C-alpha cells in the first residue's frame, strides 16, 4: 500500500480545482490506499465553519470534507502558521485536524510515497 499526501493550497470557491482534488482524494482512498491531507496557505479556509458557497456561485464542499472520515482519509494536517496568519484557530474549523509547523512539512513529504499538490 502506498502512502499518499495531498496538499491543498487554494481557498474555497475559487474554481473547480478544490472540488476536483477532493474527488481524486476520495477515489484514491476508495482503493484502500493510505491517504493524508495537508492544507496550507488559503486552503485553511476550506475547513472554516459557516461558509457561504452560494454567495460565490459555488458548490458547497464541506460535505465532501466530512466524507473524508468515511473513506479513512487521515490524518488531516493544517499548517499552523497558515492558520495563524489568517486569524483562525482550530475552533474555527469544521473537522478535527492535526497542526503541523511549517518547519516540519518537509518531513511529511519525505514520509509519503506520492505527493499531489493543487
Image (spheres, rainbow, N blue to C red):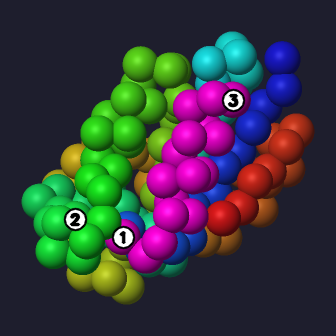
Q: Are marks 2 and 1 in contact (CB under 8 Å)?
A: yes
Residue 93 is drawn in which quadrant?
bottom left
Tag in front: 3 or 2? 2
The residues tagged by marks 3 and 2 sit, at their Cα atoms, a distance apart of: 26 Å
Residue extending furthest toward the left: 50
Residue 92 or 105: which is nearer the viewer? Answer: 92
Residue that mark 2 sits on: 53
Q: Relative to 31, is 19 above or below?
A: below
> Of marks 3 and 2, which one's residue comes earlier in the chain?
3
Q: Is residue 54 left or right of residue 46?
A: left
Residue 15 in the magenta stretch? The answer is yes
Residue that mark 3 sits on: 28
**Any part of residue 97 in sight:** yes
The residues tagged by marks 3 and 1 sit, at their Cα atoms, a distance apart of: 23 Å
Residue that mark 1 sits on: 13
Q: Relative to 12, is 94 above or below?
A: above
At horizontal 71% and vertical 61% (from top left) the residue drawn is 117
Residue extending furthest toward the front: 57
Q: Secondary structure at mark 1?
A: loop
Q: Secondary structure at mark 2?
A: helix
Q: Is residue 34 left or right of residue 42?
A: right
Query: Residue 23, image x and y in percent?
Result: 56, 41
Query: Residue 97, image x and y in percent?
Result: 39, 45
> Of marks 3 and 1, which one's residue comes earlier in the chain?
1
Q: Which residues are magenta?
A: 13-28
Q: Are marks 3 and 2 in contact (CB under 8 Å)?
A: no
Q: Secondary structure at mark 3?
A: helix
Amino acid at each position: 500500500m502506498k502512502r499518499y499526501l495531498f496538499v491543498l493550497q487554494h481557498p474555497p470557491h475559487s474554481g473547480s480545482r478544490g472540488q476536483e482534488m477532493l474527488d481524486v482524494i476520495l477515489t484514491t482512498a476508495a482503493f484502500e490506499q493510505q491517504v493524508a491531507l495537508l492544507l496550507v496557505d488559503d486552503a485553511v479556509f476550506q475547513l472554516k465553519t459557516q461558509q457561504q458557497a452560494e454567495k460565490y456561485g459555488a458548490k458547497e464542499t464541506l460535505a465532501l470534507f466530512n466524507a473524508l472520515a468515511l473513506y479513512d482519509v487521515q490524518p488531516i494536517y493544517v499548517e499552523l502558521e497558515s492558520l495563524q496568519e489568517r486569524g483562525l484557530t482550530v475552533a474555527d474549523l469544521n473537522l478535527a485536524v492535526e497542526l503541523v509547523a511549517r518547519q516540519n512539512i518537509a518531513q511529511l513529504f519525505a514520509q509519503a510515497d506520492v505527493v499531489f499538490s493543487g
